[in-house]
Amino acid sequence: MANVPDNLMYSKEDEWVKIENDRAIIGISDYAQDALSDIVYLELPNVGDTFKADEVFGVVESVKAASDLFTPISIEILEVNEALVESPEMINDDPYGEGWMIKVTVQDTSQLDSMMSAADYEAYCETRS
């Protein structure tokens, strides 16, 4: 089974969110990076961009496929992991650490209620195997 840290929340689109006060860090899960295989390209938004929940904020491409990245909550971009654009394979190596994608301001914390816990996400992933 993929690595699913308990301190994060997860979406059905395989993004994870780590909350830090009114801010959050977003990336893709270990399950997602494993399914994609070798990630070769990443397109991320610009600082200051805003997105509503479930909107596409970027694209990740691997040797297998291209996938849209969805924000599970309404956000404003505070910081983009520019190192990933140069070395997208870092997502494969460390999806929850160096492979983070964006740091954001959370616009509506009530939207977090619709996200899955680590246990729920693990169960969800098992139904897809």
Image: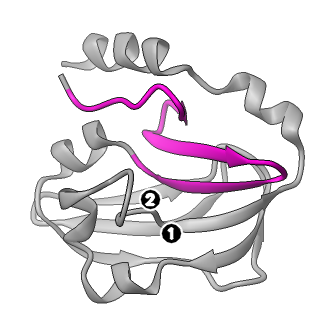
As drawn, 70 above or below 35: below
According to the image, label 1 marks what residue? 58
Labelled disc at residue 30: none
Q: Which residues are magenta?
A: 2-28
Labelled disc at residue 68: 2
Place of residue 101 in the rendered image (x, y in percent of width and height, measured from the top left): 48, 66
Q: Amino acid at mark 2?
A: Asp
Place of residue 12 in the rendered image (x, y in percent of width and height, measured from the top left): 49, 30
Q: Residue at x 26, y 75 (%)?
A: 88
Q: Residue at x 84, y 52 (%)?
A: 22
Left or right side of 50 for 42: left
Crowdedness near tag 1: few (<14), some (14–19) or many (≥20) residues, C-alpha within 10 Å: some
Identify the image quadrant of residue 89: bottom left
Q: Are marks 2 and 1 in contact (CB under 8 Å)?
A: yes
As drawn, 9 above or below 125: below
* Quadrant into which the N terminus falls: top left
Q: Residue 24 lies in magenta, yes or no?
A: yes
Place of residue 53 in the rendered image (x, y in percent of width and height, measured from the top left): 74, 47
Crowdedness near tag 2: few (<14), some (14–19) or many (≥20) residues, C-alpha within 10 Å: some
As drawn, 1 above or below 14: above
Query: Which is more N-terminal, label 1 or label 2?
Result: 1
Left or right side of 16 for 73: right
Q: Residue 49 lies in magenta, yes or no?
A: no
* Frontmost residue, 72 versus 22: 22
Place of residue 50 in the rendered image (x, y in percent of width and height, measured from the top left): 79, 70
* Frontmost residue, 5 versus 129: 5
SS label for mark 2: strand
Q: Amino acid at mark 1?
A: Gly
Q: Residue at x 35, y 66 (%)?
A: 98
